[in-house]
Amino acid sequence: MTEHRLTVRVYYEDTDLAGVVFYANYLRYYERGRSDALRELGVDQSALKAAGVVFVVRRIEVDYVAPARFEDLLEVVTRVETLKGASAVMGQEIRRDGLTLNRARVSVACMTLDGRPVRLPPEARAAMERLAG
């Protein structure tokens, strides 16, 4: 698997007064895509947290290409672009019927619960390597 795909539907609550997806809601879709990808790859984020390790978004760049609208069925595509010792850069896209509506590059860091960087746990690294393109 070099990419993960998650289907999401746009609900009324996701839209703004113009009837298009409110810009910040794309970040929610991207978070769902990353979380779902890790879950499907066998990474239990609750167990990692219990062991004192969490993932945090360090940086995100988003390119809004075209709007998504109420009732659209969207596909969130997630892949790993770069994997380092304690971080990863993930490339994500939101598509409708194969058309890219939105692109993001998300830098994710692995941290302890008190905010110190920590190396990716071996099982998380192995899972993320399967998403590397």
Image (tube, helix red, strand yellow):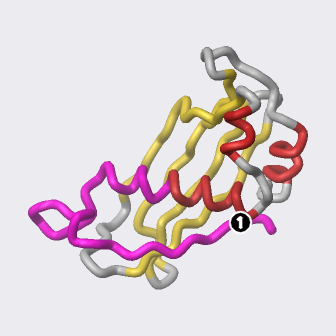
State the residue at coordinates (39%, 56%): 26
Asked whether, in this view, residue 47 is left or right of residue 19, the answer is: right
State the residue at coordinates (50%, 55%): 30
Asked whether, in this view, residue 60 is left or right of residue 78, the answer is: left
Residue 52 versus residue 18: which sits nearer the camera? 52
Whole-percent x and y of residue 45? 68, 45
- Please identify the quarter of the rendering in which residue 16 is found: bottom left
Asked whether, in this view, residue 109 is left or right of residue 11, the answer is: right
Q: Tell me which amino acid carries mark 1.
A: Glu
All told, the count of numbered labels is 1
Residue linked to disc 1 = 3
Task: Name the outermost residue toward the front.
Answer: 50
52 over 93 or under it: above or below? above
Whole-percent x and y of residue 132? 79, 54
Whole-percent x and y of residue 60? 49, 39
Looking at the rendering, the stretch of residues picked out in magenta corresponds to 1-30
Task: Please tell me whether residue 10 belongs to the stretch shown in magenta.
Answer: yes
State the residue at coordinates (61%, 54%): 35
Asked whether, in this view, residue 105 is left or right of residue 39, the answer is: left
